[in-house]
Image (spheres, grey):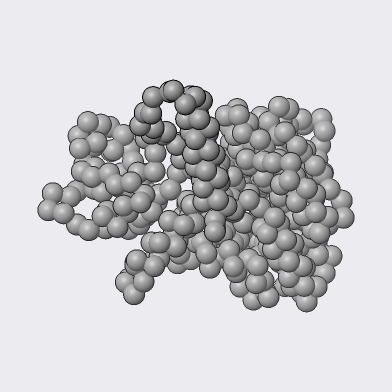
Amino acid sequence: MMPFVKRAMAATALAVALALLASCGGGASSPTASPTPVAVAPTPPPIPKVALISIDGLRADALAKAQAPEIRKLMARGVYTLRARTVLPAMTLPAHTSMLTGLEPSVHKVVWDDYVADKGTVSVPTVFAIAHAAGKRTVAVVGKEKFKTLASPGTIDSFLVVSGGDAEVVNQAIVETGVGFDLLFVHLPDVDLTGHAQAWMSPAYMAAIEAADAAVGRLVAALPPQTTVILTADHGGKDKTHGADIPEDRTIPSVAAVCVYPSHVATARARLAGTAVKVASVATAFPSGQAALAVKLADVAAAAVLKNTVVVGSVNANKRHWYRAGEVLARADHAWLARLITRREPPESFMRALQRQPDDIKVVVQFADV
């Protein structure tokens, strides 16, 4: 039985018990009255959480070749690409700054790759700042001191720089999951360090990926079930270095796997078995791997934390056409746009949304009033 079902049953039992106690207050001469129905509020769903895991220096083609069963589990239950492209310079601190702000290095201005105390912290908002300002608890557990550049004062509730490699970073991250978080960022350094020491794609490098995979598995197992997991990398590498505008340095993996109301996903998969419709428990989407895309993970993570937004669909357009369409829609009559949504179905009736009616234009499954 699912934990939230147990809690709902316990709440119902308590309400019934209280109603019975209230009805026992009169003596023998008290008149008998019909019991008043007691409304029992449903148990609210668990608060969504986001865990962003970055494997420093992980090349996408190396992940494709490595024995990485834990990461492949995430790929199987979510969506992924092995053709995401990082920014230039393809280096740890600039790339992570872009990852956590959604901005190009030309905008956030962090183009160095060491911790320089005199430069202070990043001058633009990070996803930590956005989540913290919304009252969310933010946590970062990292394996390199240079991440202090991203720890702007008052934005990260728990910031830990951990020595000892991936295993110890994950040990500390697991401790933080017990304390509680809304947004958790975990940086695993060993794959990058091994690439610099032994060369990218060397046997030692491949072994480091497999060790990182085991660490990811331990962390994911410790996360609350309503956690959106986003796993990616900052850059790749060639020989014993990185930073150039070449595929080996810039091509990285991105994986998103989400556990949001898993009972709905199971029901949908069962009802749609044997059809061409694929159901995934995901709150965001990455390209299929057929084309490169610069993914702004800061925007993705912020939206998932603050809105718990689920968007399912496809767009057959290139990036330029997509933005042009957005500009046109922004100038359109909003009342007219609202009329394009002709039906709104609750989650428990999602199958009705898949059954076309004559006057349908756009049908949505609405999880909450907005």
State the image coordinates of residue 247 (x, y, percent, origin top left): 60, 64
Residue drawn 41% across and 34% down? 39
Please say if 133 is above or below 220.
above
Pick the residue in front: 93 or 282: 282
Question: Residue 134 at x, y = what percent?
Answer: 57, 29
Q: For the view shown, which residue lies furthest in the front direction?
A: 29
116 with respect to 84 (left or right): right
Going 40% across and 65% down the picture, which residue do you hit?
269
Q: Is the N terminus in the top left, top right, bottom left or bottom right quadrant? A: bottom right
Residue 9 point in image, percent of width and height? 51, 47
* Residue 108 appears in the figure: no
Res 35 visible: yes
Image quadrant assignment for residue 305? top right
Q: Is residue 183 above or below residue 203?
A: above
Nearer to the camera, 116 or 281: 281
- Relative to the observer, which residue lies in front, 67 or 271? 271
Asked whether, in this view, residue 368 is left or right of residue 67, the answer is: left
Q: How far across and how far down the image is residue 233, in percent?
A: 65, 56
Q: Quadrant of residue 164?
A: bottom right
**In the figure, residue 71 lies in which quadrant?**
bottom right
The residue that appears at 67% across and 45% down in the rendered structure is 184
Q: Nearest the camera: 47 or 331?
A: 47
Which residue lies most toward the right here? 164
Q: In the rendered image, which quarter contains the C terminus?
A: top left
